[in-house]
């Protein structure tokens, strides 16, 4: 079983979890292009003049990943789910700094219904608005919020999401549909 296979990546993640820092050195070149693709997908949904580039986003996420303590990596999908969450955090932090600089900390613009529809269709995302909405969703349904994060931000498939969350395929599909409808309504306010 080669290191390039999902099983090989999972084995490297397990070695890293067990304290083998050399496993991280082997792992990162194997997952770098997929992390860069994920970062590119995030940034395509940002404004055209965004100052972060995919490489910078991957590097910042890598630094946060490397500093993860006591993570028991379950699988390749689990790793990319956490990486996606960290990239989201980097973008939210960046957007907050930019908003503070630009507006002196003033309130951010709200999304229109048309913009909210595009959010669900993975285009032109206002990272702060979606982050705030996800935080509200997490207050009453953490699983739906996690599914949105894994599907929308990490780009995981239904199957990969079921693996990360250890729930049924039908549950992920149902919660994904409910969460999308909730987000449309919430972001249209």
Image (cartoon, rainbow, N blue to C red):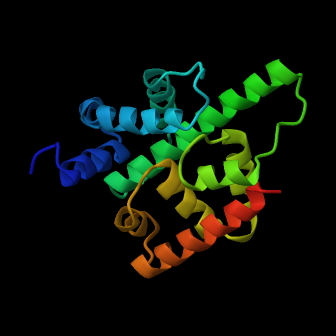
- Identify the residue shown where x is 61% and y is 29%: 47
Looking at this view, is 111 or 14 the one in front? 111
Residue 136 x, y percent position in the rendering: 76, 59
Q: Is residue 91 positioned above or below 72 on the image? A: above
Q: Residue at x 83, y 36 (%)?
A: 108
Q: Nearer the viewer, residue 14 or 52?
A: 52
**29 left or right, relative to 41:** left
Is 146 situated left or right of 25 in this image?
A: right
In this view of the protein, can residue 71 be seen by the observer? no
Quadrant (top left/top right/bottom left/bottom right) for the C terminus: bottom right
Q: Residue furthest left?
A: 1
Q: Which of the 4 image quarters holds residue 161?
A: bottom left
Could you tell me how many numbered marks the image carries? Answer: 0
Q: Residue at x 36, y 58 (%)?
A: 74
Residue 89 percent location from the top left of the image: 61, 39
Note whether residue 18 is visible: yes
- Estimate the x, y position of residue 134 in percent, counting from the top left: 68, 55
Q: Is residue 40 left or right of residue 136?
A: left
Front position in the image: 36 or 165: 36
The residue positioned farthest toward the front in the image shown: 114
The one of 127 and 146 positioned closer to us in this rendering: 127
Q: Give the vertical position of 68 relative to 143 (above or below).
A: above
Where residue 107 sits in the image (x, y, percent)? Answer: 88, 36
Q: Quadrant of residue 120?
A: bottom right
């Amino acid at each position: 079983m080669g290191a390039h296979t999902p099983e090989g990546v999972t084995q490297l993640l397990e070695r890293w979890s067990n304290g083998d820092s050399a496993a991280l050195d082997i792992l990162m070149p194997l997952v770098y292009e997929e992390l860069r693709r994920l970062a590119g997908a995030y940034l395509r949904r940002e404004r055209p003049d965004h100052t972060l580039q995919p490489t910078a986003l991957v590097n910042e996420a890598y630094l946060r990943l490397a500093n993860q303590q006591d993570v028991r990596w379950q699988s390749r999908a689990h790793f990319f789910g956490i990486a996606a969450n960290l990239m989201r955090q980097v973008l939210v932090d960046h957007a907050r700094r930019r908003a503070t600089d630009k507006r002196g900390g003033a309130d951010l613009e709200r999304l229109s219904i048309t913009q909210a529809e595009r959010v669900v269709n993975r285009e032109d995302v206002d990272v702060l608005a979606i982050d705030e909405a996800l935080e509200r969703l997490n207050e009453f349904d953490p699983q739906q919020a996690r599914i949105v994060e894994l599907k929308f931000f990490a780009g995981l498939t239904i199957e990969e999401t079921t693996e990360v969350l250890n729930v049924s395929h039908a549950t992920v599909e149902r919660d994904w549909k409910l969460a999308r409808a909730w987000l449309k309504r919430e972001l249209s306010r």
